[in-house]
Image (spheres, rainbow, N blue to C red):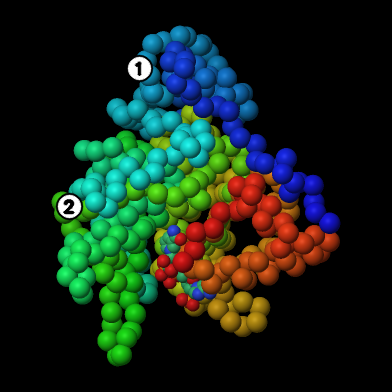
């Protein structure tokens, strides 16, 4: 038996609060008691294009904000800015990028390997704490000189300097983008990656991955060949009420970090009046040791600020044990919470994202199979339906 919610008419609800190109009129809403944290105490002025106005007013009403005034104001097409208030994050000079309306609007292959964008390294730092295994760095590139832009969940290609064993230029390697479309500074014009240095043993020698070592060693100011962006598999739904379950191993956290910033980072929320996330976001994250946890301080901050919206479950494989006494992997956490996860999946607003090691997939399927069977449902029939409904997103290697 198939649950009706998985049927073809059970697609996720898509927010219609998007700007169109046809109506460039701008409106400024003066609001009190709206936003996050200290923002709620300040009076804010939010300027949006006319097609976003209704959605903004709904959002304000739903969050208990009080509208003081609405005025028509001509602001150049494409801006969605907010006047600075003493307590709100400062508005930035660059226009906010509008959320793409559909997959067709998502930028792809703006720069190809034959004519890559040349980005400049702005920063490169380790994400790991003392005692961690290996090397994982957060690397940011300046994109301001060109037209390379992207949305959350996409990847870019990096072509490392140098030549391969045959004297040919290296091929590009794809990396999931770890920043939102506004970049880590929320001003646009940058992109960030989360990169683990690949290392393996061969014939008693340690081999370092070509591109990951190139990136982990790179210095600020260096020029790097960048291609892309690519990928439409891991796009975040524009629905602010969506539930988002994220399953990540190691650097597979990259797209999830971008989603979580978009959902909960105060400066991001200020930048996106049309995306004030209020659904449930549940991150299940697998790392080998506690010092290998990535972006932990940010996630703890989101937990403290959004306890109703953010849930964070860890599988620390070399410190925790699964019920059989083996290493605790994220599929063990999925098994532990299978009924709850399955119930969430039954809600058409729920999306599941998986990024990282392919090895997690069979265990996750097993857990879902059992949870579905308990409700007389067949997971092998349901999963393709979820995929078709664009609610099951997998990027594993
Ligand atoms: P890592 O720090 O080594 O952590 C991976 C965690 O997963 C460890 O706790 C590891 O446990 C655990 N693990 C190992 N085998 C597993 C399995 N079969 N099922 C579930 N968990 C397992 O991770 P990493 O080096 O960053 O690797 C992440 C992987 O994601 C890489 O293969 C990378 O290429 C890929 N990745 C993919 C994307 C993408 O798809 N777009 C983006 C970024 C990264 P133990 O080591 O303790 O066994």
> What residue appears at the point 29 percent right and 66 percent down from the top-left corner?
212
Q: For residue 252, what is the image quadrant?
A: bottom left
Tell me which residue sits at (47%, 15%) in the image.
Answer: 23
1 relative to 13 in the view: left or right: right
Q: Position of residue 330 (x, y in %)?
A: 57, 67
> Above or below — where is 333 with respect to 88?
below
CA gap between label 2 and label 1 equals 33 Å
Q: Is mark 1 within 8 Å of ligand 1?
A: no
Residue linked to disc 2: 223
| Residue drawn at x 50%, y 16% as measured from the top left | 50
- Front residue of this view, candidates 254 and 99: 99
Residue 120 lies, with reference to residue 72, above or below; the image says: below
Q: Residue furthest bottom?
A: 204
Location of the N terminus (image quadrant): bottom right
Residue 300: x %, y % from top left = 48, 53
At x 32%, y 37%, the residue is 188
User: Is residue 172 left or right of 50 when viewed as pictured?
Assistant: left
Circle 1: element type: loop
The single residue placed furthest to the top in the displayed view is 72
Instruction: Find residue 394 and report its image quarter.
Output: bottom right
> Can residue 121 be seen at all in this image of the molecule?
no
Q: Are marks 2 and 1 in contact (CB under 8 Å)?
A: no
Q: Position of residue 333 (x, y in %)?
A: 62, 67
Q: Is residue 184 above or below residue 70?
A: below
Mark number displayed over residue 76: 1
């Amino acid at each position: 038996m198939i649950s009706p919610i998985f049927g073809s008419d059970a697609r996720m609800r898509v927010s219609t609060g998007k700007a169109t190109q046809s109506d460039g009129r701008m409106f400024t809403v003066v609001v009190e008691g709206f936003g996050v944290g200290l923002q709620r105490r300040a009076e804010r002025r939010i300027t949006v294009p006319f097609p976003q106005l209704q959605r903004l007013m709904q959002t304000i009403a739903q969050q208990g904000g009080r509208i003081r005034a609405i005025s028509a104001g001509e602001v150049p097409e494409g801006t969605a800015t907010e006047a600075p208030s003493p307590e709100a994050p400062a508005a930035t000079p660059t226009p906010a990028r509008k959320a793409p309306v559909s997959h067709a609007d998502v930028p792809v292959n703006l720069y190809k390997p034959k004519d890559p964008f040349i980005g400049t390294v702005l920063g490169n730092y380790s994400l790991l704490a003392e005692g961690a295994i290996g090397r994982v760095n957060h690397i940011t590139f300046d994109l301001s000189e060109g037209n390379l832009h992207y949305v959350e969940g996409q990847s870019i290609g990096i072509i490392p300097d140098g030549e391969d064993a045959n004297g040919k230029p290296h091929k590009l390697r794809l990396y999931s983008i770890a920043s939102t479309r506004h970049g880590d500074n929320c001003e646009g014009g940058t992109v960030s990656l989360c990169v683990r240095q690949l290392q393996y043993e061969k014939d008693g020698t340690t081999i370092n991955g070509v591109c990951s070592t190139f990136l982990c060693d790179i210095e600020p100011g260096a020029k790097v060949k960048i291609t892309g962006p690519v990928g439409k598999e891991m796009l975040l739904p524009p629905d602010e009420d969506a539930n988002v379950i994220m399953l990540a191993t190691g650097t597979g956290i990259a797209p999830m970090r971008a989603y979580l910033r978009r959902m909960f980072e105060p400066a991001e929320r200020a930048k996106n009046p049309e995306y004030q996330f209020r659904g449930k976001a549940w991150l299940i994250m697998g790392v080998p040791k506690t010092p290998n946890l990535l972006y932990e301080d940010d996630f703890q901050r989101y937990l403290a600020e959004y306890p109703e919206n953010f849930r964070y479950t860890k599988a620390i494989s070399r410190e925790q044990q699964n019920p059989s006494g083996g290493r605790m992997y994220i599929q063990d956490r999925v098994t532990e919470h299978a009924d709850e996860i399955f119930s969430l999946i039954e809600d058409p607003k729920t999306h599941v994202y998986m990024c990282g090691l392919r090895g997690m997939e069979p265990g996750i399927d097993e857990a879902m199979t059992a949870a579905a069977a308990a409700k007389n449902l067949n997971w092998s029939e349901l999963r393709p339906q979820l995929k078709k409904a664009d609610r099951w997103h997998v990027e594993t290697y």
